[in-house]
Amino acid sequence: MVRTATIQRKIIITAIAWTIGLLIFFPVLWTILTSFKSEAQAIADPPVFLFFDWTLENYSIVQERSDYLRYLWNSVIIAGVSTLLGILVAVPAAWSMAFTPSKRTKDILLWMLSTKMLPAVGVLYPIYLIFIQLNLLDTLIGLIVVLMMINLPIIVWMLYTYFREIPKEILEAARMDGASLQKEILHVLTPMAVPGIASTILLNFILAWNEAFWTLNLTAAKAGPLTAFIASYSSPEGLFYAKLSAASTMAIAPILILGWFSQKQLVRGLTFGAVK
Amino acid sequence: MATLDSRTISRMMMAPAVFLLLVWMLVPLTMTFYFSFKKFLPLRGGDLGWVGFENYIRFVTSSSFWPSVQATLAIVGGVLLITVFFAILLALLLDQPMWGQGIVRILVIAPFFVMPTVSALVWKNMFMDPVNGLFAHLWKFFGLAPFEWLSQASLLSVTMIVSWQWLPFATLILLTAIQSLDREQLEAAEIDGASTLARFYHIILPHLGQAITIVILIQTIFLLSIFAEIFVTTQGSFGTKTLTYLIFQRVLESQNVGLGSAGGVYAIILANIVAIFLMRIVGKNLDK
Amino acid sequence: MRKKSALFAAGLLVFAVVGGTFNQSHAATVVTIATVNNGDMIRMQGLTDDFTAKNPDITLEWVTLEENVLRQRVTQDIAAKGGQFDVLTIGTYEVPIWGNNGWLVSLNDLPPDWDVDDLLPAIRNGLTVDGQLYAAPFYGESSMVMFRKDLMAKAGLEMPDAPTWDFIKEAAAAMTDKDNEVYGVCLRGKAGWGENMAFLTATANSFGARWFDEDWKPQFDSREWADTLNFYVDLMNSYGPPGASTNGFNENLSLFQQGKCGMWIDATVAASFVTNQNDSTVTDSVGFALAPDNGLGKRGNWLWAWSLAIPAGSDATDAAKKFISWATSREYTELVASKEGWANVPPGTRKSLYANPAYQEAASFAEMTLNSINAADPTQPTVDPVPYTGVQFVAIPEFAGIATQVGQEFSAALAGQQSVAEALEKAQALTTDEMEAAGY
């Protein structure tokens, strides 16, 4: 009796969950489907769902017009390096906040987060002038620095919450055993910190990848990432749904795939200290 | 001696991050301050001298100012409400035993990976377009006149688009929180005959409290500065001109850097009011 | 798990290192071109092999952006003197202002065979400041009525070559068939100085309205503006497509191509798109007429030229000049004609094109385009005298910002969120405010 009841319940829940999941995912799915249609089919009335002449034409048009790989490359470099640099700066800071907290620790942490609230448009002109002076316009380095600064508060915050979970007793026990500082870090702490660091990297990589204000305003031909790539497809003359969909799919596919493959790490770490 | 030493080390470890953020904050901020007291019109020759508080007065007395503050609060508040409410439901649902849980989770996370520009473009053109959009087809299928989303319900449309992007984030955090819930306590309550609603209200919701404050804090930080969604969909028409967008209009469209900078200073003040308010709550939770 | 993340991190680092060496600068002169993602520009980008074959020492880098983003980027860069671009795609609004500021390189020394005297006088004047040509026109346009001959015939009407606004309204009423998704008239409604305000300012001219009187006082409280806006809102609400307040040029183009508009009053360049068999479903039934008037001696057509200019301070001025004289030459026109047919060449810049029998034959819209361009007078845009030049814009730096905000008020009026009177009142207030801020 109980068993059939739970199975019935499981069936219903599965059905509901799948329906909702598909609904939430639908805009992405629809974009991907549309990217394989011809422009005429993309606006067909009534809309065609699966039974149309699948074509790769849009992808070849987009690739011919803009060198996708170059934008992809820039995106990977900017998001990747800015995240790693951020981690390098943030790990020591978060570490000391977590293990030798002082009265000021919390204030500093909250102050760091508050710098994220600076409205980007408000400081565009100053940053632009500084970039001109330092010759950083349209360079990967310039964007890496900006995106690192933007995400640094989030990185410190996330790492701090992970490190705080590491029991101090383990540290002390290792010291009692006479482990050197180096060994302590290498063999005791690193394994415990790695999952947190991994999910921090993932989340900030995604945030940096999707950042669209600075990456668009500080680049021209050389350093433009995928956000700049998409800006040339957003509303051209004539029918454009299929081409826009193809460009969109190309812009989001890498991060979507990365996100899906590493979702376990991402999900495990995505707590911001909210879960004790 | 040892404590002093460890304190010094700890300071040195924090120094790079603190120093970088200080520079990142102070340099542009000082420049914005400087510009905000100037008549600075790049298209008319640039720096045209000091004007005192004129820009500040002009910015707030402009007919667009209060509507823009309202629009900002409406969008931020609306998105927070929608995402938190649906994220709680979704997290509860995803926590139940089912087939293909991993795949459902993948489907639900997907919007978070989509760039704001792309999601705004896709929603605007392929869903909300009153002639060729999917919603229009759906409405017509039910014999209704297509709804003009972006002009008739512009704030709602923008809120919907942004909520779609942030729902996964809220869901994931709340889901992790629910999974850490003490199962025995729940089962005990069930045996005691507590109704589903009572269990949710007395056990699950309090447990989620902290996770919800974190969701609100992090999302608010990002939502206060949303730009791409508005730039792509309405360009600030139909009452969707947020404070951020108004500053954009002053600085870039009107090329009045002085006026825009004064707006920037106001935005910083607004952000800090919100921040102090939020951090009071979160700060308390951090101590728990 | 550990291995995976370590691998991931290492991978990124390798990318970074390789990326650093990958981005070394080229030996050739690099010309960075900022352009808009319109069809003709995309075609130009596709044909650059012809240019680089003739100029192997020049490398072209393209920054192709959507119009709004392009304007924002280019204006920001030139105002702050960022120097990121060597060739800018700008229009007849920017050229006089920027030229006056000394921000553009004079193009008076382009080679003689480029033949500056072949340019249409209206266009050439619009790009010249104090005798210096500051930009070379890539394509020029006015606006005109494009209509469906089949629908007109079905409605039992005949479009005159020079219709009045009253006739447009009558025809729109006769052609509208909402059950079959055919709307009598499609017009711009999307807010923006280059979107609805271009159309409305030009239309206002034909109603005798003006932006400013001779003392630079805003005129939105005048009866002429009220007439203009009331007519427009009423026309669109009765016979326009749904969601008209978010439709710009591109949206209307796609509606027209799908056969959903009876008439469309917009840029003359659209003619080659709506008659293009690849994209359009109404290719054979499109007719053209001059923009409407109200019997006041001014028609509601504008004048615009997307042009190529070189910012002062570019480090590749000579190479940029070579590129511009290639892209705006007669030879380029012939190149496009040989590859894509005469109907697809960039229109509206040169007299020789309109004298060319091959073009006249291929482009049914040629004559109407030329007449429309010639009918626009930027120095005397409307009935009453004005202190500014520009047909669908006012050539002062503040205009873009002001008109976009005014456009938003008008767009909201079209969407029914406020009355026409309210919209005009707000427009008057905010224009007065902005002009004061600018020191008028």
Image: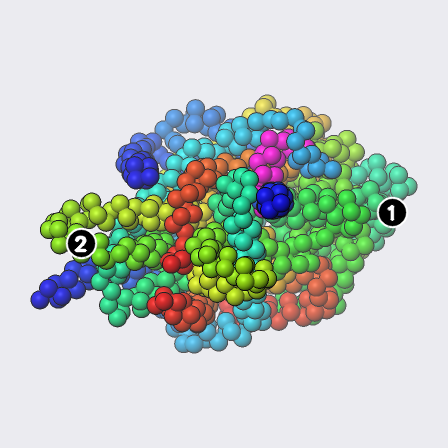
Quadrant housing the N terminus of chain B: bottom left
Q: Position of residue B174 (x, y in %)?
A: 48, 55
Q: Secondary structure at mark 1?
A: helix
Read off the magenta span: A24-41
Q: Residue at x 26, y 49 (%)?
A: A88
Type of the residue with mark 1: Ala
Q: Residue at x 14, y 54 (%)?
A: A175
Q: Residue at x 28, y 48 (%)?
A: A192
Question: How busy is the neighbourhood of tag 2: few (under 14 within 10 Å), some, or many (20 plus)?
Answer: few
Task: Tell me if I can see residue C2 in this picture.
Answer: yes
Q: Position of residue C275 (x, y in %)?
A: 71, 33
Q: Secondary structure at mark 2?
A: helix
Disc 2: which chain?
A
Left or right of residue C235, residue A59 in this image: left
Task: Give the camera-side residue of C100 and B171.
Answer: B171
Front disc: 2 or 1: 2
Q: Position of residue C96 (x, y in %)?
A: 52, 53
Q: CA distance from mark 2 to mark 1?
A: 89 Å
Q: Which residue is mark 2?
A: A173
Q: Which residue is mark 1?
A: C174
Question: How busy is the neighbourhood of tag 1: few (under 14 within 10 Å), some, or many (20 plus)?
Answer: some
Q: Quadrant of residue B62?
A: bottom right
Left or right of residue A157, residue B197 in this image: right
Q: Are marks 2 and 1 on the same chain?
A: no
Q: Is residue A39 magenta?
A: yes
Disc 1: which chain?
C
Task: Tell me if I can see residue B272 in this picture.
Answer: no
Quadrant housing the C terminus of chain B: bottom left
